[in-house]
Image: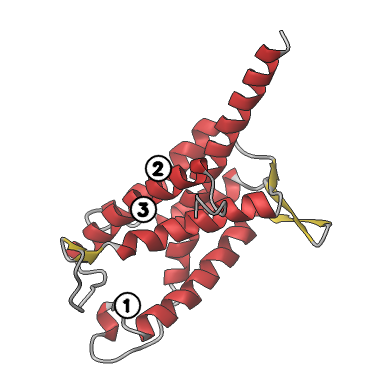
């Protein structure tokens, strides 16, 4: 994809980071019994096939592609430190809720407070649109939930309630994807901001 120009070198780096983050989460969740990959595979690591990391990487790829192709821009983005801490807390909660309280609803409330004024702007057919960013998070999470219903129906992985036969993935999983998309978006947005600042600094030095 890099050779063909569909992805840039910077986007490849982001996708690789997400692959590692996703694979680590998958290994932990499978170990805790949250879901399983019952089929045999040639490339399993601690019971998790390597393609599972690519599922998270595909979300990063989508965000990078959408950012570039839809000319995404943001307004009202919160303080970098606050956004980073919130993203880290969300990611850690996927691990810690197995041992202590599940803070997802507290974190979701924090999301609406922190991103209350944040808007995402994008272009479609030469027209400019915007939406509140929590709505964007929810819509992406909802469509990922639809995709995982298709994936589990085809046997890519199973949740505990699907071992005796396929059932619809519980609606509560939308909240999990909502939170995971936020972590993904924060990482991509912060990397875009860092790249923009470096580019501005480089250009200013050239004109000195």
Q: Is residue 46 left or right of residue 80?
A: left
Quarter assignment of residue 38: bottom left
Which structural element holds mark 1?
A: loop
Q: Quick check: 78 above or below 208? A: below
Task: Indicate the colouring scheme.
Answer: secondary structure
Nearer to the camera, 171 or 140: 140
Alpha carbon distance from label 2 to label 1: 28 Å
Alpha carbon distance from label 1 to label 3: 17 Å
Counting residues from the start of the chain, the first of labels 3 and 2 encountered is 3
The residue lying at 44 percent from left, 38 percent from top is: 85
Residue 70 point in image, percent of width and height = 70, 55
Which structural element holds mark 3?
A: helix
Which circle marks residue 19 in the picture?
A: 3
Q: Residues within 10 Å of mark 2 (few under 14, many from 20)?
A: some
Which circle marks residue 177 in the picture?
A: none
The residue lying at 63 percent from left, 61 percent from top is: 135
Which circle marks residue 88 in the picture?
A: 2
The residue lying at 28 percent from left, 83 percent from top is: 161
Counting residues from the start of the chain, the first of labels 2 and 1 encountered is 2
Quarter holding the C terminus is top right
The residue lying at 36 percent from left, 53 percent from top is: 19
Return the residue at label 1: 156
Q: Quick check: 133 above or below 35? A: above
Q: Is residue 114 left or right of residue 157?
A: right
């Amino acid at each position: 994809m890099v050779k063909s120009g569909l992805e840039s070198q910077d986007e490849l780096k982001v996708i690789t980071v997400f692959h590692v983050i996703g694979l680590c989460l998958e290994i932990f969740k499978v170990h805790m019994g949250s879901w399983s990959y019952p089929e045999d595979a040639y490339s399993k690591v601690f019971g998790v096939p390597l393609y599972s990391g690519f599922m998270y990487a595909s979300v990063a790829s989508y965000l990078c592609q959408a950012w570039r192709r839809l000319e995404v821009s943001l307004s009202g983005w919160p303080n970098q430190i606050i956004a980073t801490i919130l993203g880290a807390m969300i990611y850690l909660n996927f691990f810690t809720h197995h041992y202590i309280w599940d803070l997802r609803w507290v974190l979701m409330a924090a999301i609406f407070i922190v991103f209350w004024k944040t808007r995402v702007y994008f272009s479609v057919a030469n027209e400019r649109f915007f939406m509140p960013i929590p709505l964007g998070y929810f819509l992406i999470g909802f469509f990922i939930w639809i995709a995982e219903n298709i994936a589990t129906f085809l046997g890519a992985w199973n949740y505990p309630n699907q071992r005796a036969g396929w059932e619809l993935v519980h609606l509560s999983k939308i909240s999990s994807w909502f939170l995971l998309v936020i972590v993904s978006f924060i990482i991509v947005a912060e990397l875009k901001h860092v790249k923009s600042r470096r580019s501005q600094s480089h250009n200013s030095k050239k004109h000195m």
